[in-house]
Image (spheres, rainbow, N blue to C red):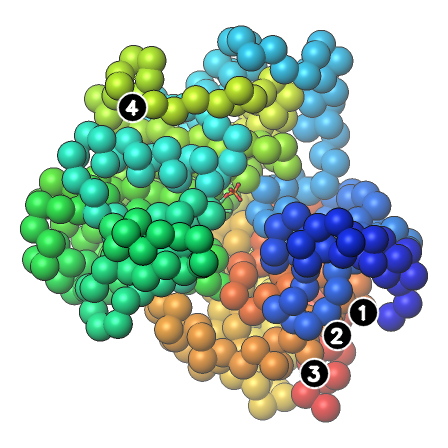
Amino acid sequence: MSTPRSTELFARALRLFPGGVNSPVRSFRAVKGTPFFVARGSGARLFDVDGRAYIDYVLSWGAVILGHADPRVTAAAQRAVEKGTHYGAPVPEEVELGELVQRCMPGLERVRFVNSGTEATMSAVRLARAVTGRDLLLKFDGAYHGHADSFLVRAGSGMATLALPGSPGVPEALARLTVVVPFNDLDAVRDVFRRYPGAVAAVIVEPILGNAGLIPPCGGFLEGLRELTREHGALLIFDEVITGFRAALAGAQGRFGVVPDLTTLGKVIGGGFPIGAYGGRADLMANVAPEGPVDQAGTLAGNPVAMAAGAAILRALADERPHAALESRGRRLVDGIGELARRRGLETWGDAVGGMWGVHFTRGPVRNFGDLARADQEVFSRFFHACLRRGVYLPPSPFETCFLSSAHGDPEIESTLDVVEAALDEATS
Ligand SMILES: *Cc1c(COP(=O)(O)O)cnc(C)c1O
């Protein structure tokens, strides 16, 4: 595939940025490739600097739910930016977006806007530690909660042991304040509460695991977390940075009917602008400065352009309710790819929830990251490149979720399945 302009830009980028990128997964390392540079996007498609078009299933890692350059979002952002970019003072746009978030997700009685999902999760954990007076944090293997030190940890050896640093630079003393257990395993959670009585401040969970493929919660798992945290005086934090407004308008908490104490948001609520939010029970949020003593601030937080874009998106989602249609298109992709793979002797496992879908080259069921780690990464890598050459852009890693926007119609799904058929022939030949 000849992409001279991307090749030239990546050579320059390598002299500037570590690995040539400003966020690691963009580098295509997991699929042993080099990235294309984007010139522009429109609806379901991306156009690269060499003039090639791709049906996009990455969609800014889930942020872009109405499709690229949606006219309603563009107009809202333009109207805002013409008045000025940011003031560091309250603006009407933040009240509007805040009220929309509150209306869609009843668990968010109070909310605070920040600039990224990482800021949202680290602030929610600080708040949880402050109000419980406890230090331990429980997270699930394979979940991603941003790049703050407390989350960049890996499981210690044996069940329910304290975690080890997951990256150089994360202090061991801090890693030991996190415990990592398998997703969908309530017994493991129970064991942590038994082993560390009165010490767990919060359980943080992606209610649908979206950073280790797409792994939905087993029946009763989220309800079980709700009961266990209540019983042991810990807070339940749903990290809905991906699932918020994507799994359903009311997020995974609306879809599964389990209301957490705190929720973190990002991605969709800014529609491609830098944003994050955390919120939840009013009595807990009352502890955040300046109402309470828990410090947390942001010079650019509540940026009017991001707020206006986010409000345009939430209004469109509330009017159009696209989630059922997104899910049925995702289901067509999962079933279609599964059938085409089976005819070529490949086993797959996949699922679709709202605007998220995923197919993995492994025999199911996949209930946690350990199950997913057995998937065939070599086949995925060949499949990824074979799709890309034919104009279908999947996430460049076997451990990511694919996304859909409301701009992906039946014609896009049909062309994608045609591409998949040819790509599977190439990947298995
Ligand atoms: C992307 C993501 C984050 C981090 O958000 P950033 O905006 O990249 O900092 C946190 N949690 C989940 C579940 C995510 O998918």
Location of mark 3 (residue)? 427
For label 2, the residue is 386
Please tell me whether mark 4 sits on a helix, a strand or a loop: loop
Residue 305 position (above or below residue 259): above
Q: Does label 4 or label 2 sit earlier along the sequence?
A: 4
Please give left or right for residue 33 compared with residue 130 in the image: right
Q: Earlier in the sequence, mark 4 or mark 1?
A: 4
How far apart marks 4 and 3 lie (CA) works out to 53 Å
Q: Residue drawn 13% across and 62% down?
A: 191
State how far apart marks 4 and 2 are (Cα): 50 Å
Mark 4: amino acid: Val
Q: Are marks 1 and 3 in contact (CB under 8 Å)?
A: no
Depth check, mark 4 against mark 1: the one in front is 4
Q: Are marks 3 and 2 in contact (CB under 8 Å)?
A: yes
Q: Residues within 10 Å of mark 2 (few under 14, many from 20)?
A: many
State whether residue 271 is above or below residue 426.
above
- For the residue pair 258 and 272, the one nearer the viewer reads as 272
Q: Which mark is residue 294?
A: 4
Residue 230 relative to residue 315: left or right: left
Mark 3: amino acid: Ala
How far is the residue under mark 4 from the one under mark 1?
Answer: 50 Å
The residue where tag 1 is placed is: 389
Kind of residue sitting beneath label 1: Arg
